[in-house]
Image (spheres, grey):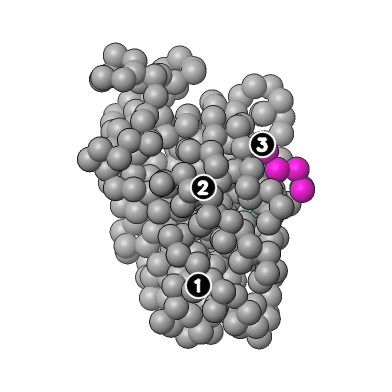
């Protein structure tokens, strides 16, 4: 990370004066960069017993395996990870956890360490707004968790997003930039970090943002990453949208060029609906890349 705070920068952010294009990161360019594979991740939150988790994955497995060109991730509760891992062996479904603690081991009753998560999972969600809201996670704890996850080779899915009053007072850009800055402070290499832009007002409310709004904010997040790191890091980084995504509205988001997929809550608990979200993503992103 470059050692300067975006808060000294005037909003809106700009790359002017830093290179050839100025003003934006060309995330559509394929010159010298990897193509970003779209991702749909299901955050099951605190839902499903072990047998329900097994049943849910069993219902999706075959259908998901038939869909190409999308990375499919499920994030069940901790207690179901082992059972789900067994079930998805040999399939295209990848596994993620919903949280971790930043210490590797010791007297931290009830916590799960990065090493334990890395034994089972490839991905881990960090900084979800529900953890910030109900479990007092701060920028500092999110930063420590991110470092811990990256250290053991996990691919973090870092959640950021503004609250309703912040959106209504025109502070979205400032808030997401500040969240990024505090989450990433002192981290030099982002590994395979994925960002999920999840406006808090859209989570579990049925009031999804519009594709255009999200595309704009994701573009700003990308610009911020380019300022903090460099353009290639920003071009390669996948940035997802989360907040009341359903099979009925996924087609609003996926045609937007900046949005690389979705982090899905409620709708990921219904096998048919999750399949439909993944299928539509594959079709829409496939058309765009042709
Ligand atoms: P919903 O899709 O239920 O709104 O939840 C989104 C979310 O928080 C994913 O992490």
- The mark that comes first in sequence, 1 or 2, is 1
Residue 106 image offset from top left, x and y in percent: 41, 71
Residue 23 image offset from top left, x and y in percent: 39, 19
Report, in whole angstroms, how far the alpha carbon at label 1 lies from the one at label 3.
Answer: 29 Å
Task: Give SS at disc 3.
Answer: loop
Question: Can you tell which of label 1 and label 2 is closer to the viewer?
Answer: 1
Q: Are marks 1 and 2 in contact (CB under 8 Å)?
A: no
> Which residue in the protein does label 3 denote?
210
- The mark that comes first in sequence, 1 or 3, is 1
What is the chief secondary structure element of the magenta stretch?
A: loop
- The mark that comes first in sequence, 2 or 3, is 3
> Which residue in the protein does label 2 denote?
240
Residue lying farthest left?
32
Task: Give SS at disc 1.
Answer: loop
Which numbered tag is attached to residue 66? 1
Residue at 34%, 18% (x, y): give it.
22
**Front-most of residues 259 and 203:** 259
Whether residue 274 sits left or right of residue 180 in the image: it is right
Question: Can you tell which of label 1 and label 3 is closer to the viewer?
Answer: 1
Report, in whole angstroms, how far the alpha carbon at label 2 lies from the one at label 3.
Answer: 14 Å
């Amino acid at each position: 990370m470059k050692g300067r705070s975006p808060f000294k920068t005037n909003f809106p952010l700009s790359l002017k004066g830093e290179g050839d294009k100025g003003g934006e990161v060309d995330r559509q360019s394929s010159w010298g960069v990897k193509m970003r594979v779209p991702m749909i991740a299901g955050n099951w939150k605190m839902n499903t017993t072990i047998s329900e988790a097994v049943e849910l994955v069993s219902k999706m497995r075959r259908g998901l395996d038939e869909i190409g060109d999308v990375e499919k991730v499920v994030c069940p509760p901790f207690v179901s990870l082992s059972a789900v891992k067994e079930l998805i062996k040999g399939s295209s479904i990848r596994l993620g956890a919903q949280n971790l603690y930043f210490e590797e081991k010791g007297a931290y009753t009830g916590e799960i360490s990065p090493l334990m998560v890395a034994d089972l999972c490839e991905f881990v969600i960090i900084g979800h707004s529900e953890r910030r809201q109900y479990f007092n996670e701060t920028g500092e704890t999110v930063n420590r968790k991110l470092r811990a996850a990256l250290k053991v080779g996990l691919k973090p899915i870092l959640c950021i997003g503004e609250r309703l009053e912040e959106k209504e007072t025109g502070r979205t850009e400032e808030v997401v930039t500040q969240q990024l800055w505090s989450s990433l402070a002192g981290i030099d290499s982002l590994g395979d970090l994925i960002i999920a832009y999840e406006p808090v007002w859209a989570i579990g409310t049925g009031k999804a943002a519009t594709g255009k709004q999200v595309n704009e904010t994701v573009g700003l997040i990308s610009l911020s990453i380019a300022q903090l790191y460099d353009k290639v890091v920003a071009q390669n980084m996948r940035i997802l949208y989360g907040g009341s995504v359903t099979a009925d509205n996924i087609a609003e988001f996926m045609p937007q060029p900046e949005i690389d997929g979705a982090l899905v809550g409620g709708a990921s608990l219904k096998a048919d609906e999750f399949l439909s979200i993944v299928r539509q993503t594959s079709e829409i992103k496939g058309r765009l890349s042709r």
